[in-house]
């Protein structure tokens, strides 16, 4: 969905490096999410934010942190990357208050490789 | 623990034949149910959802899904498969009043010409 963008699209880094993945949206949605996708495991929620002042841990938040800089921006950081954080990362948005019943809109993903 | 299961890693079907991608859920209450599709190098795209009412839900690209409360299932169907339907399909559930959508592991659909 072009309304949700992620940068970078691909990143290769080394163990121990700090990495930031960025997500921007023009949909005007309040809720934003970070997921990681691993083969055979589907999508797992890392963090979610319901507005700029509300940030919550998901099921696999260890080793990650987030920042909600504005309604439109939600960044994911890996403070010290490790190889098992190699995955495809997705940002998503939703806005149930608009009657969409939490249908989520996904960015194109960031493929992260930690060597 | 709440979960969504997609029992088939892969489904193979010939073009023109009907397809079914299976999903069962274990989520409290009366959850909202979703199907998403992921094409290569793309994010997930919403296909359809069940909230309440008619057990047969119609969605994008000719897909439909059948909700069965007694079997806690929400299978994705299409009467006639196209090669372009080949993709990774995810079932998901959100319990009413909850905040987090639970995704299945995904099922890869191959449609052969």
Image: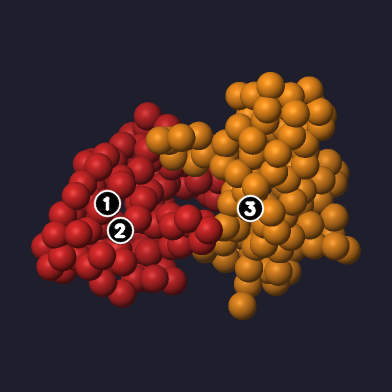
Chain colours: A red, B orange
Residue A84 location, x and y as percent? 31, 66
Quickly name the residue at label 3.
Answer: B9
Residue that appears at 35% across and 55% down? A87
**Taking A88 as reference, is A115 left or right?**
left
**Taking A115 as reference, is B57 left or right?**
right
Q: Crowdedness of circle 3 by 10 Å Cα count: few (<14), some, many (20+)?
A: some
SS type, badge 1: strand
Whole-number angstrom distance, CA of label 2 to CA of label 1: 5 Å
Callouts 2 and 1 in the same chain:
yes
Q: Crowdedness of circle 1 by 10 Å Cα count: few (<14), some, many (20+)?
A: many
Residue that appears at 71% across and 69% down? B26
Residue that appears at 35% across and 43% down? A109
Q: Quadrant of the N terminus of chain A?
A: top left
Quickly name the residue at label 1.
Answer: A112
Instruction: Decide which of tag 2 and tag 1 comes sooner along the chain.
Output: 2
Quickly name the residue at label 2.
Answer: A86
The chain under label 2 reads: A
The single residue placed furthest to the left in the displayed view is A17
Q: Nearer the viewer, residue B47 or B105?
A: B105
Residue B57 location, x and y as percent? 78, 39
Residue that appears at 42% across and 46% down? A93
Q: Are marks 2 and 1 in contact (CB under 8 Å)?
A: yes
Would residue A60 be seen by someone viewing this image from the given angle?
yes
Q: Nearer the viewer, residue A100 or B90?
A: B90
The chain under label 3 reads: B
């Amino acid at each position: 969905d072009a309304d949700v963008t992620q940068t970078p699209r691909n990143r290769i880094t080394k163990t121990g490096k700090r990495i930031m993945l960025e997500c921007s949206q023009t949909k005007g949605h309040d809720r934003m999410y970070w997921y990681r996708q691993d083969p055979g495991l589907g999508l797992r929620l890392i963090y979610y934010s319901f507005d700029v002042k509300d940030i919550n841990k998901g099921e696999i938040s260890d080793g990650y942190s987030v920042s909600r800089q504005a309604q439109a921006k939600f960044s994911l950081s890996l403070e010290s990357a490790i190889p098992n954080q190699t995955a495809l990362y997705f940002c998503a948005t939703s806005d149930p208050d608009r009657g969409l019943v939490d249908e989520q809109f996904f960015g194109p993903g960031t493929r992260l490789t930690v060597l | 623990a709440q979960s969504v299961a997609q029992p088939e890693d892969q489904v193979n079907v010939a073009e023109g034949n009907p397809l079914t991608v299976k999903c069962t859920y274990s989520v409290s209450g009366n959850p909202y149910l979703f199907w998403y599709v992921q094409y290569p190098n793309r994010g997930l795209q919403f296909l359809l959802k069940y909230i309440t009412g008619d057990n047969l839900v119609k969605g994008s690209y000719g897909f439909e899904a059948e909700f069965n409360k007694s079997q806690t299932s929400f299978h994705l169907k299409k009467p006639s498969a196209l090669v372009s339907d080949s993709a990774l399909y995810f079932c998901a559930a959100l319990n009413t009043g909850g905040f987090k959508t639970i995704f299945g592991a995904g099922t890869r659909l191959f449609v052969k010409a």
